[in-house]
Image: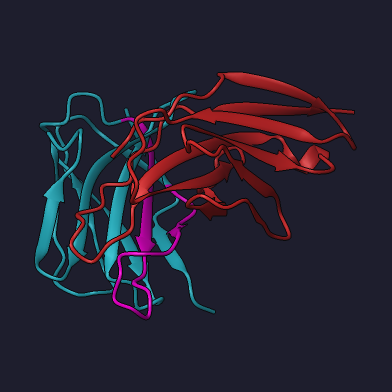
């Protein structure tokens, strides 16, 4: 699976959009981009995933560049409860893939009042 | 409600003792995973299993053992051979799509915090 690179930490003002970048320059054609977040001392929670089109759900939007080498997770109106570590991972979805699902260190987002 | 349950939430162990962490899911998921997390670090994969009676080592399997005798259960044993077992342990499961693809997001339990005294 391709590796990802994320900034170690970011701050965002409450009510503003939080834009979390992720680089995955070695991503291959059949790898999806997934985002999870982990609030302190809890299990990570799925946020969103995509292949090449931009995606939006009730939690966030995912923007994937045309060359698929990077993506951005957007939390449109950050609240204090969005303070968490955000993980970007890439993985293959396929019948024969032995999917290890590796998590890097992620980005620690602090939403500031 | 469907979900994934880890127990115990907190566990203390003396050096030299083996301990087993429980992970049970009622989501009918095929794949299950064990991760270890140290303070301020990301998740590191210990073991994973795609189907019953089959499992694979992750990146840090030394000192750990697992079994997958039932689809819903994937217990992790932290053996005395694990040099630094104090950590937060997370179990996860993932389903298969209608087309039989290894798709879908991971569902995580609430974790088990192991402390070696």
Residue A10 in picture, x, y percent from top left: 68, 21
Residue A100 in picture, x, y percent from top left: 26, 47
Q: In the image, which lettered chain appears red?
A: A
Magenta segment: does it hold B92? yes
Number of callouts: 0
Residue B59 in picture, x, y percent from top left: 20, 34
Look at the image and tell me whether residue B114 can be seen: no
Q: Residue at x 71, y 35 (%)?
A: A83
Q: Is residue A61 found left or right of B64 in the rendered image? A: right
Q: Quadrant of residue A98?
A: bottom left
- Which residues make up the magenta segment? B86-111
Q: In the image, which lettered chain appears cyan?
A: B
Q: Is residue A35 found left or right of A73 in the rendered image? A: left
Q: Quadrant of residue B106?
A: bottom left
Q: Quadrant of the C terminus of chain B?
A: top left
Instruction: Decide which of A63, B36 is in the foreground and name it.
Output: A63
Q: Quadrant of the N terminus of chain B?
A: bottom right
Look at the image and tell me whether residue B59 can be seen: yes
Q: Is residue B24 found left or right of A110 in the rendered image? A: left
Magenta segment: does it hold B88? yes
Residue B93 in picture, x, y percent from top left: 36, 62
Q: Residue at x 35, y 78 (%)?
A: B28
């Amino acid at each position: 699976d391709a590796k990802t690179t994320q900034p170690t930490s970011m701050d965002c003002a409450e009510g503003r959009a939080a834009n979390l970048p992720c680089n995955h320059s070695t991503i291959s054609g059949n790898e999806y981009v997934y985002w999870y977040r982990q609030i302190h001392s809890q299990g990570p929670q799925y946020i969103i995933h995509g292949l090449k089109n931009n995606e939006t759900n009730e939690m966030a939007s995912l923007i994937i560049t045309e060359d698929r080498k990077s993506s951005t997770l957007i939390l449109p109106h950050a609240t204090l409860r969005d303070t968490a570590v955000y993980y970007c991972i890439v993985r293959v979805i396929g019948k024969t893939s032995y999917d290890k699902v590796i998590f890097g260190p992620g980005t620690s987002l602090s939403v500031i009042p | 409600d469907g979900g994934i349950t880890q127990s115990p939430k907190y566990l203390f162990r003396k050096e030299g003792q083996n301990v087993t962490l429980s992970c049970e899911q009622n989501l009918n998921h095929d794949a299950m995973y064990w991760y270890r997390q140290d303070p301020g670090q990301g998740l590191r994969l210990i073991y994973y299993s795609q189907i019953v009676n089959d499992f694979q080592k992750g990146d840090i399997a030394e000192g750990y053992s697992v079994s997958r005798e039932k689809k819903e259960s994937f217990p992790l044993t932290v053996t005395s051979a694990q040099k630094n077992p104090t950590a937060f342990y997370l179990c996860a499961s993932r389903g298969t799509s209608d087309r039989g693809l290894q798709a879908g997001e991971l569902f995580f339990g609430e974790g088990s915090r192991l402390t070696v005294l």
